Image (cartoon, rainbow, N blue to C red):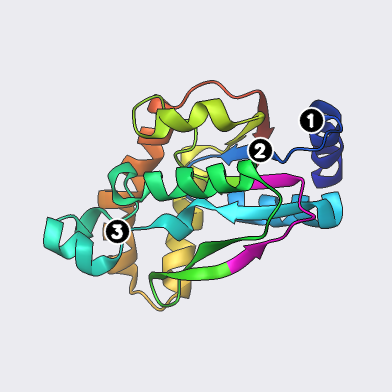
Amino acid sequence: MTEALAATIRSRLGAGPSRRFVALAGPPGSGKSTLAEGLARALGPAAAVLPMDGYHLDNALLEARGQRSRKGAPWTFDVDGLARDLARLRADDRAVLVPVFDRALDLSRGSAREIGPAVRIVLVEGNYLLLRAPPWSDLARLWDLTIRLSVPEPVLEARLLARWRALGWSDERARDWVRSNDLPNIRAVGEGSAEADLIHPAG
């Protein structure tokens, strides 16, 4: 299925000298990161992954704003920072260093990934890339192709519970976080996202 989607991406984007941006959007737990990495392998050296999660606001800033309990919500990301990096990637062919989120440390590591000069297809993956509300909606003009992952909510909930338990969280803590944070974010994506060019069933 990944190979088929990679072939569709190649066909839709065509050939050209400029970098192309593919938005891979979907709710938490939908498998965006796994799909993006698989597509990058299938597309070869001309493709690279830019994860939206690298633009998480730092926990200290979220604490200061009283937003730590909603980390991962649409307003807890540096959307302007993501837009600036996309603009740099579009402007020329130089290598661009981008941040990556370290889930084990629960923080973003700056300049942790290089998107090199040979990259023509940038696979941008994240929850909110297709949101209709600003500032996320300002990204819409940048996408050359949009893909939305479709997964039933019960499957997402089970995956997210497994994710937090794998990090050593107690069952109670995992369930509380999924109920109070992950599920609202899932519904924000489902209710607030624009239509995508392609729907990819991932559950």
Q: Nearer the viewer, residue 67 or 49?
A: 49
Instruction: Name the residue type under label 3.
Output: Trp
Write down the quadrant of residue 114 in the picture: bottom right
Cβ atoms under marks 2 and 1 closer than 8 Å: yes
The image's mark for residue 13 is 1
Q: Is residue 76 magenta?
A: no
Image spot of residue 150 (x, y percent):
59, 34
Residue occupying image coordinates x 84% and y 35%: 10
Q: How many marks?
A: 3
Residue tagged by mark 3?
177
State which region is magenta: 113-123
Q: In the figure, is residue 57 to the left or right of 97? A: left
Image spot of residue 115 (x, y percent):
67, 59
Q: CA distance from mark 2 to mark 3?
A: 30 Å
Q: Nearer the viewer, residue 73 or 191?
A: 73
Residue occupying image coordinates x 65% and y 38%: 21
- Local SS, label 3: helix
Residue tagged by mark 2?
22
Which circle's residue, 2 or 1, is located before the other in the chain? Answer: 1
